[in-house]
Image: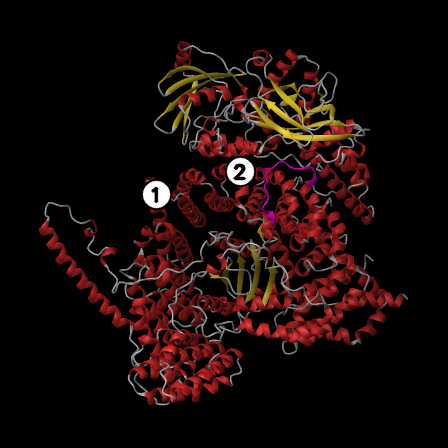
Amino acid sequence: MALKIVKGSIDRMFDKNLQDLVRGIRNHKEDEAKYISTCIDEIKQELKQDNIAVKANAVCKLTYLQMLGYDVSWAAFNIVEVMSSSKFTYKRIGYLAASQCFHESTDVIMLTTNQIRKDLSSPNQYDTGVALTGLSCFVTPDLARDLANDIMTLMSHTKPYIRKKAVLIMYKVFLKYPESLRPAFPRLKEKLEDPDPGVQSAAVNVICELARRNPKNYLSLAPLFFKLMTSSTNNWVLIKIIKLFGALTPLEPRLGKKLIEPLTNLIHSTSAMSLLYECVNTVIAVLISLSSGMPNHSASIQLCVQKLRILIEDSDQNLKYLGLLAMSKILKTHPKSVQSHKDLILQCLDDKDESIRLRALDLLYGMVSKKNLMEIVKKLMLHVDKAEGTTYRDELLTKIIDICSQSNYQYITNFEWYISILVELTRLEGTRHGHLIASQMLDVAIRVKAIRVFAVAQMATLLDNAHLMTGNVQRKGICEVLYAAAWICGEFSEHLDNPMQTLEAMLRPKVATLPGHIQAVYVQNAAKLFATVLKNQEGNTEGTAAQETSQLMIDRLPLFVQSANLEVQERASCILQLVKYIQKLQQKDVEVAEEVIALFAGELNPVAPKAQKKVPIPEGLDLDAWINEPPSESESEDEQPKAIFAKEETKHSRPRHTEVDEKELARRREVRKQEQASNPFYIKASPSSQKVYQEAPGVDHIPVVQIDLSVPLKVPGLPMSDQYVKLEEERRQKDRADKKKKEKKKRKEKRSGRGKKHDSGPESEEDITPAHMVDIVTEEMPENALPSDDDDKDPNDPHKALDIDLDKPLADSEKLPVRSHRAAEPLKSPAEDGDAESAASQEPKKKSSKEKREKKKDKDRDRKKSKDEKKKKKHRHEEKGEDLLGSQADEPVVQSEETSEVAAPPASNTAEVSDLDFWLSNAPVPSNTQEAATLPAAVAAPVPETPSGTAPDSEPDEPKDTEPEETDKKSSKHKKKKQKKEKKEEKEKKKKKKHHHHHRHSDGGAEESVQNGTVEEEEEEPLPPMSNYCLLAENSYIKMMMEDADQENDIQGNLQDGSQVVVSVIFENKCDSFLKSMEFNVLDSLNSKLQRAEGSGPHDGLTVPFQLPPVVSNEARFVFTVQSIVMPQKLKGTLTFIVKNEDSSTHEKLDFKLHFTCSSYLITTPCYSDAFAKLLESGDLKCSSVKLEGVIMPFHHLLARICFHHHFSVVERVDSCASMYSRSIQGHHVCLLVKTVSEPVKLEISYNQLLCLKKKKKKKKSVLSDCDLDFSLSVPLPPSLFRQ
Amino acid sequence: MIKSILIFNNHGKPRLIRFYQYFAEEMQQQIIRETFHLVSKRDDNVCNFLEGGSLIGGSDDKLIYRHYATLYFVFCVDSSESELGILDLIQVFVETLDKCFENVCELDLIFHMDKVHYILQEVVMGGMVLETNMNEIVAQVELQNRMEKSEVSPSATLKDHASVLTSNITVFISLVADLRIAAHISDVASDPNRSDVAVDVVETTDQSELSRPSS
């Protein structure tokens, strides 16, 4: 026994470690595989030992072998063992191995959950760090779900080292478990302002990564990022932020306007090229989003282009490359500014670096004009000849075609030239783009009618010399061109000079070596040619010639009938029979040509590529429905052969019938093209080194041409494109000369008249007229085509799941799953024992910390149990969700408590949007903006801290949460005056805090609610007969109508009381049952509270003091206390009631939302014009104006509306101009000047220092919108808040 | 996001591979081969960016690489990364290696792949840049190394062996006859690249002798 142990340990001593393994492998170069396999055997032995050190060593070696390409997944379990070692050394080895070879389908991963959790909470920061690093590589959806909460806790770890890792890994967690995004986001945002730059940079990194995919959800963070951008000095962070802004600006042009100045400053000041480059990039993005050419922006463009030119001229190839890359972005919107650097770009085309040449090629696309197209293409053709390596040559080819065909052949003045270019391109060896050339040929021939004669002649020559292309199987790519050639010759055969010759060329035996689909086209078009030939010959009254032609067909077609390709076979046999029949007729001297021609009569129209897609689906057509029920299993065997046949069919779907209508034909061509593109066997011919065309230098390689030629051969009849360039030049000169003559004449005729506009430039674009009037047929679209051109996003994109609205308040069901025990239950679902422990639910946060402690104690509890609990919890969440929908009402009291938790977040979405608007509309003065930026940033955090299981230290707003509750209690005791004082003090405190702690984002959560807290009142007004009542909520039992707090009666009293608003609600019983025990409850926000009866808790409802018999309505009033009237607010509320009829009674509930806008806080106060004038003179008021368009109603009507809905009074009115006045309940003056300037009503609004006004955009279009101003009272904000 | 980090030498031999998205081993090797093929045919004086290979990522991706003496450092990144930034990052990484290994050369990477990984883990995590400050990276790596040393103090394992050795010298001798040990020694000794192998062996015995009195 002892000996065994000894032997084991000595073995161990001589175990190979990683270095030995590497050495060994290097020494066994000749039989490496064998050596490694023995090593793997050794490793397997080592893994069987109990000693963890040995195992770790073995795993370490496996990691190395994995790098060499050996599958080590068999050791996954051992890796987990090593990971769970208590020693950091081994743990690290284990995690490294796991990160290298674990992936989502590694099943042992699920064993690691607890181990990882343990490591995450290890007191040793490096244990945690190593676990986080490992986890970042192999996190699975399950792990993400189970560990999300732990990682979130780590985001507030004391060590920045852990914080930054935790922040980074959150991105991976979000990807795998998108539900975690919303609960974790507030904390992530907090980390943007972490004191440690590393953590900050990590947070920026993650948010940028998130925002890049779904930018619109992150617009609200723009102010915060803006602040970071202006304050940060870390170039890494700056680059990330600037890149992020590049993604955001397309969504919000105003953001771009704001950015331009700081960005241009950066461009001027920075010395870091990387930063400069990113700045330029983002400025470009901004300029693209601000499509309007504002004058000062042309300066920015110039700056960008200038800087880029410097980059491109730099000797550093990297900068050159990036400069070109950025240039191509400018090109899209500002081609003019790029075109001036044409020289530079053409120069780059000659660069030795392929990447740079490719970039320069991209730019060429936008540089061409009618004038220089030929010149540029000529240059490119030279490059094509010179280019080595097929990829670059292919790239050139596609670029040439792209450049020429762009915007519907806009720049081509001479199509003969273009066709000859295409023909020249067919000489390219081994290109993959034969189909591209083919489709261009087809497209041009079909759409440019004038070119057909020429095209047909060219194609006939191509067909004649087809052997040059078919010589080699590897030239498959290019022989696609023959497809086009054959089709063009057939279709437009009437233009052929010598159709007979072409026909013969098409029926050569060699053709049988072509790919099937080309043969099929050959056969089909041979028939068309045949028809033409017959017609010619019959016209010449040479009966014998016609018969000879038929004979030729009959002789040659059997070759195709034997083809292995079904398509070819079918067509050939069909046509063969047809020709035989014709021959019979000919022998009887019957004239058949006309009838044969009729087979192929008709004009073809081009069809737009997306036409098929856009054909609307006829009503009642369900393509997914079975036409016949699917066969049962037993029949499947019989179906087999059919299926194969069908497959074969689709592979070569081309026009099958002789008389297919033209559209069909064209469409099928499209289909074929698509299939070719997707069919791997089709175009991907491996590049051949064989040169086939005579003009190419390596002539002797051509297998077909037997004669050894030292002089390049000219293919007879194949024109050189150069010759057309010359011709074109001449023509243009002539044109110009002509024009000048004409102009001279004209000038003579009318000397006094101003010169023609287009005469300004000596060679302006317009001067170049196309060689022949080209009728470019536009592509056809189906009638009532669907307009949508929706880009199809990849449904598998993991980022799609992260498209989550982050501004919405967090719902209860969204909390992260916490591994917790029964003791923690009350927090998660107060419904369970809320009655018993109402106190518990009042202080959920304290509880959570308790829970935390408990969790730690029970950490080692067995896993299964916790899992079960999780399931249960989930279930409960679902139940709760139903409750919230109001369908069940078993425990009404508890429910209201639940809702109170759910709806606690006070800030509404609109408030936020308007904040962003506010920030964006702000004057771009840096100092100003910085201050302003903090506010929206704070407001942008409406989501409460995830209540579950968060660490107590991460809840800075905890005490503040309880504060308002206390005040609330006091208020319910009607100690109003005292309360008022307190509130004022509080408010002041908070204001102060706000001033002094702008940067302390951590208390944003609390502050934000303070600001948001609003006086409440109803706003949504109904239709013209002006009434303040609006529908609040309605179900089958009851209808709630809400009246704006009566401005006449109650507000006076309110004024004295500080801030109180009375809301009248009309309850209307809609059913025929008796409604009783109505309880009205609203979720208090931090500063808007429902005044409740003395002694009742903050979650208790108010009993409505009446019952409702069927079809009766009554009105109840509710008083709300308000602290700040800064912003509009929505409050959520519930009405619970009992429906009682003869036999039963049910408990029902109805949810509603109270919407309070700022104009609700205004009180109609009369004001005399002299007082009004004084007020204006005092200078205390800040001024701003807004223009409203599309106001249709008469002016007096408008005034009436403003008075009625927004509680203003008219001070003075002169014609179409009126001044109005109002006061807020806190005594702010608001003056309004309404002017009508013809149509748009202009509102000029003055207000005192504490008041800001805002126009709500979304209301603009509603019927009443024209005067539906949303007034928002805002504390120390700068003015100029209006925007259109 | 960084999609993958590859280090290979002028002959395409991988020295470190790190994929931030899963590929089977075979695919990984193919990617290395393809990347090597793309990168190796480029001159040293052309730009360091390469539009993505066919195997990894989509059109959004770029290969950004640097060539140091015998090694290529290739980062495959998507468009959210700044090209010049990544070039800097590679520089930071290499300089860090240089600090940690003291005059780093290919051999260091060959024999200490694990250590290189640990250093890389402090620079990039899960495809995102974790730290760019070299001093911070080096500090963290050193701290972890120190921790490792304290855990695996030389006495821990060697002492065991030593005690076993002294008391069971006969077993040892009988085992020396064992082929495995002989093979091992030949492995170790015949490595042409490491003349210090002999020293390695000597050290081992030295240490065991040193620890003898203590046991």
The answer to whether A693 is drawn above or below residue A65 in the figure is below
Q: Nearer the viewer, residue A43 or A553?
A: A553
Q: Nearer the viewer, residue B143 or A587?
A: A587
Disc 1 residue type (three-letter):
Gly
Percent of width and height locating residue A1220: 43, 17
User: What stretch of residues is rendered in magenta?
Assistant: A801-813
Disc 2 residue type (three-letter):
Ser
Instruction: Give the residue displayed 39% in from the left and 84% down from the top.
Output: A702
For mark 2, name the chain: A
Q: Residue A551, which numbered label?
A: none
Q: How many marks?
A: 2
Is residue A378 visible to us here? no
Residue on which the image places disc 2: A220
On whether residue A68 falls in the magenta region, the answer is: no
Residue on which the image places disc 1: A293
The part of the image, by quadrant, that contains residue A262 is: top left
Q: Circle 1 sits in a helix, a strand or a loop, which is it?
A: loop
- Which image quadrant: the C terminus of chain A? top left
The answer to whether A1072 is drawn above or below residue A592 in the figure is above
- How packed is label 2: few (under 14 Cα within 10 Å), some, or many (20 or more)? many
Percent of width and height locating residue A738: 15, 60
Of mark 2 and mark 1, the one earlier in the sequence is 2
Q: Main secondary structure of the magenta part?
A: loop
Percent of width and height locating residue A859: 80, 44
